[in-house]
């Protein structure tokens, strides 16, 4: 199994508070991703990183920011949590091969509830 | 933009029966295709992938998938299902490219129930 951990694994927070989720990898992979999973939507990409300090938006980035100061850590911040951000959040990592393709490996997820 | 359709939200099969989960994709170039499995409360595990070459790919746990360009499909199959295969299955399509992240677009998933 790929060495990916997420913390915390479960969190309950109140509307309007900031929340930071952490993803840590031990694989030294260049690319890291944050997804959210909601019933009926599959997984949707929030933000991704293609190197230290290099990040870009995914399809559902509003209300989220990310930072990557080290290869191994990718942080997702909910600037002011809302009930619509109640979800399960997954981190993933990948490395691109010479073909330009690369499969992603997923962490165990963080279940976030915003009350 | 790339997209994935998994037309079956829920499928029930008997243990020992064969299984086929459908996946149709939309992508302008040669796609990179993946199947992932998710057990309850767990992360996603890669079952198999197609990048190029042989259109029939073998994966873990006895699964296989066939890439059919003419039908824009990448269906997952297993000849004999085990009770432990009960899970949710996700098809995904990737846009590759050196120097860029291999972003994936996921289908909405198919939940497999196995009856004994």
Image (cartoon, helix red, strand yellow):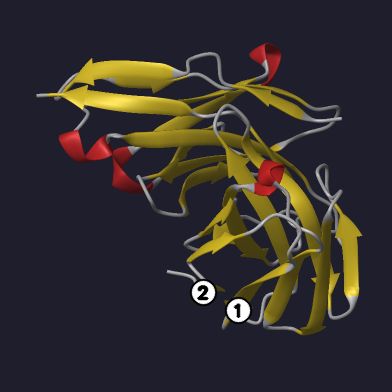
Residue B67, percent from left and from top: 58, 27
Q: Give the residue drawn at x 56%, y 22%.
A: B23
Q: Which residue is most to the left? A: B116
Residue A49, percent from left and from top: 81, 67
Residue A64, percent from left and from top: 81, 58
- Label 1, on which residue? A24
Query: What is the chain identity of the residue bearing mark 1?
Result: A
Q: Do the numbered discs 2 and 1 sit on residues whose CB atoms are within 8 Å? A: yes
Q: Observer-nearest residue: A3 or B27?
A: A3
Q: Which mark is residue A5?
A: 2
Residue A108, percent from left and from top: 47, 62
Q: Observer-nearest residue: A29 or A47?
A: A47
Quadrant of image for the N terminus of chain A: bottom left
Q: Which residue is most to the bottom? A: A70
C-alpha span from label 2 to label 1:
5 Å
Vertical arrangement, residue B73 with respect to residue B57, above or below: above
Vertical arrangement, residue A30 with respect to residue A71, above or below: above
Q: Is residue B78 visible?
A: no
**SS of the residue at dot 2?**
strand
């Amino acid at each position: 199994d790929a060495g990916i951990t997420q913390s915390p694994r479960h969190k309950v927070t109140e509307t309007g508070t900031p929340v930071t989720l952490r993803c840590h990898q031990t694989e030294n992979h260049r690319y890291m991703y944050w997804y959210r999973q909601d019933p009926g939507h599959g997984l949707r990409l929030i933000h991704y990183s293609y190197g230290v300090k290099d990040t870009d938006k995914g399809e559902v980035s509003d209300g989220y920011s990310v930072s990557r100061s080290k290869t191994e850590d990718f942080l997702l911040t909910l600037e002011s949590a809302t009930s619509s951000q109640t979800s399960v959040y997954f981190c993933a990592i990948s490395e691109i091969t010479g073909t330009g393709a690369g499969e992603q490996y997923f962490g165990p997820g963080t279940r976030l509830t915003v009350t | 933009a790339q997209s994935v359709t998994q037309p079956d939200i829920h499928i029930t099969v008997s243990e020992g029966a064969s299984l086929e989960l459908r996946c149709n994709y939309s992508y302008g170039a040669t796609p990179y295709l993946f199947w992932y499995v998710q057990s309850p409360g767990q992360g996603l595990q890669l079952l198999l992938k197609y990048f190029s070459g042989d259109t029939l790919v073998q994966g873990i746990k006895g699964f296989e998938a066939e890439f059919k360009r003419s039908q824009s499909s990448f269906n997952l199959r297993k000849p004999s299902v085990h009770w432990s295969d009960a899970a949710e299955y996700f098809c995904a399509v990737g846009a590759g490219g050196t120097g860029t992240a291999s972003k994936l677009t996921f289908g909405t998933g198919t939940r497999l129930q196995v009856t004994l």
